[in-house]
Amino acid sequence: MCQSEARRGPELRAAKWLYFPQLALRRRLGQLSCMSKPALKLRSWPLMVLYYLLPLGALRPLSRVGWRPVSRVALYKSVPTRLLSRAWGRLNQVELPHWLRRPVYSLYIWTFGVNMKEAAVEDLHHYRNLSEFFRRKLKPQARPVCGLHSVISPSDGKILNFGQVKNCEVEQVKGVTYSLESFLGPRIPMEDLPFPPATSCGSFRSQLVTREGNELYHCVIYLAPGDYHCFHSPTDWTISHRRHFPGSLMSVNPGMARWIKELFCHNERVVLTGDWKHGFFSLTAVGATNVGSIRIYFDRDLHTNSPRYSKGSYNDFSFVTHTNKEGIPMHKGEHLGEFNLGSTIVLIFEAPKDFNFKLKAGQKIRFGEALGSL
């Protein structure tokens, strides 16, 4: 036996050991596919979870015996992430006994590298449940807001991607794109249009870019579980419209974003749109697994991850009324909203061609630090 075959021996043995349960589960899921949809979801999702949790280290040898990652993508999309996230949200609301708070929160701090010295309240016994701990506030001077640049980071996190929007496609991570129109939805609510909305890329871009010589820019910030979970206004702007997309709550970590095309378009999200001094500006809070709760402080009508909303639709709300013809004015650094765990913020905005980002892909950033300026 040659050396290459000897080296591959353990991998082939792992492939044989894992291939048969994978095949058996695949057959069982196929048998369940003839059921009605409610029965199928109830009976098949435990098998799907088991199928999905087969050791990730075996992906390489499994690919050599004909297993295709596409099946795993379809499987993961079938997991009831919305239901699981609602259950997690209720668990987070359970008040912990006083004696249990320090060990539980200390484990979380150690696991995700939380810096409690920045927290407004450092005493772990103060937080009655996990939800309060996730949404902890910072000390007033922990995040100074940069005054020299026109756009700042709205949150702590990691820069996944940034730059100009080209061909109405936005990169969620390098090499993986999604449609700008699918992500934001129609520029104007359908019921307000006297004619069908334009669907071509150029027409949709022209609805966003309002001033000659301007370009569209984007920036994607991923919030890890250990990050500060509130988000703030990235610039001085006026919010005129909110669009809520009910959807899946799949993980948005960078590895998953490389794996699932148009992940951000599948997930539940809240799109805030308005204008700043250079034209169109939008901030989108994207939900994720265990992050079904997205809160916008001034929007009491917003209820995310609610069973009454079905996926594939969206709900519009206008902040422009007869008494308030401008919308909601926001100042740079002002509190805007919060997640109940980590997630993603996507900025899409119009600016002159000489706008420059002060960023590097993959860098860690904190709320208040510069994103870019003219």
Image: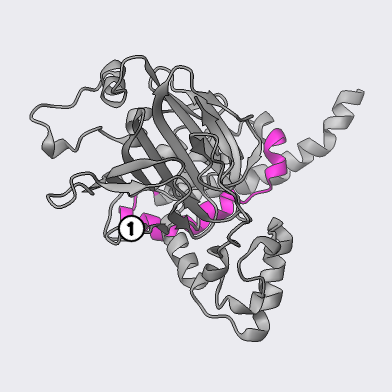
Residue 236: name its quadrant: top left
Q: How is the structure coloured here?
A: one colour
Answer left or right for 112 relative to 319.
Answer: right
- Residue positioned 47% across, 61% down in the render: 84
Secondary structure predominantly adopted by residues drawn in magenta: helix
Give the percent coordinates (x, y) of residue 8.
82, 31
Residue at image position (46%, 57%) is 338
Coordinates of residue 333 in the picture (x, y in percent): 48, 48
Q: Residue at the location (58% across, 35% down)?
A: 160
Left or right of 5 on screen, residue 134: left
- Inspect this view and state whether residue 71 appears: no
Along the horizontal axis of the image, is 302 left or right of 268?
A: left
Task: Answer whether residue 110 is visible to the viewer in this image.
Answer: yes
- The front one of 17 and 362 is 362
Residue 291 image position (x, y, % from top left): 48, 56
Give the residue at mark 1: 298
Residue type, label 1: Phe
**45 falls in the magenta region:** yes
Which quadrant of the figure has residue 256? top right
- Residue 217 vs 241, above or below: the answer is above
Instruction: Determine the secondary structure under disc 1.
Output: loop
Q: Is residue 130 magenta?
A: no
Q: Indicate the position of residue 10 as horizontal and vertical percent values.
A: 83, 39
Seen from the viewer's position, the closer of residues 366 and 28 is: 366
Viewer-side residue, 220 vs 255: 220
The magenta region covers 33-61
